[in-house]
Amino acid sequence: MIGPLNPSHDRTAFSCGVEPLDRYLATQAGQDMRKHVAACFVLTEDRDPSIRGYYTLSATSLALADLPDELVRKLPRYPVLPATLMGRLAVDCRHRGRRFGELLLLDASARTLRSEIATYAFVVDAKDENAQAFYEAYGFRRLPSAGRRLFLPVASIAKLFS
């Protein structure tokens, strides 16, 4: 079951092996939700409050100039476009190899599609080469001027779910 983080979830036992991601969930995620800075969604199993994985969503924007020319030609000439950022995605080490990362990514994509707020693209920040390869396997493309930031137009996501 994937749903919003709430006080009944056991955040202290979560360990994905990446200290900043573990610390964020344990100490910052609840504050970000209360302040409406980011929404945190967690994967749990029925009647077990331990978190198998999580991701965060927030609003961001993409500069039109940062997008590939073949996409820019088809877009309005706004200087920036609205986007949804999945700032964090992590799976507990004890639950790796069960495709929970894929499940969380698909859930985040579906939430983005269901939103009534316009968003041109779904954006992710890959922490390393392995994460970048994970996202690229789902069709994400690098933003040339933004390091490991990748994007996928929401129209491409909609095709996956149709």
Image: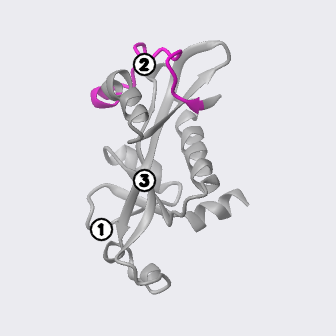
Q: Nearer the viewer, mark 1 or mark 2?
A: 2
What secondary structure characterizes most of the magenta part?
loop
Q: Nearer the viewer, mark 1 or mark 3?
A: 3
**Residue marked by disc 3:** 59
Give the amino acid at mark 2: Phe
**Crowd around label 3: few <14 · some 14–19 · many ≥20 (10 Å):** some
Q: Quadrant of residue 142?
A: bottom left
Helix, strand or loop at disc 3? strand
Residue 4, relative to residue 64: is it above or below? above
Mark 2 and mark 3: Cα distance apart in space: 26 Å
| Sooner in the amino-acid sequence: mark 1 or mark 3 | 3
Mark 1: few/some/many CA within 10 Å (<14, 14-19, 20+)? few
Residue drawn where x is 36% and y is 21% of the image: 26
Residue 9 in magenta stretch: yes
Amino acid type of the residue tagged 1 in the rendering: Pro
Which label is found at residue 14?
A: 2
**Span highlighted in magenta in the image:** 3-21
The residue under the point 33% across, 48% down is 129
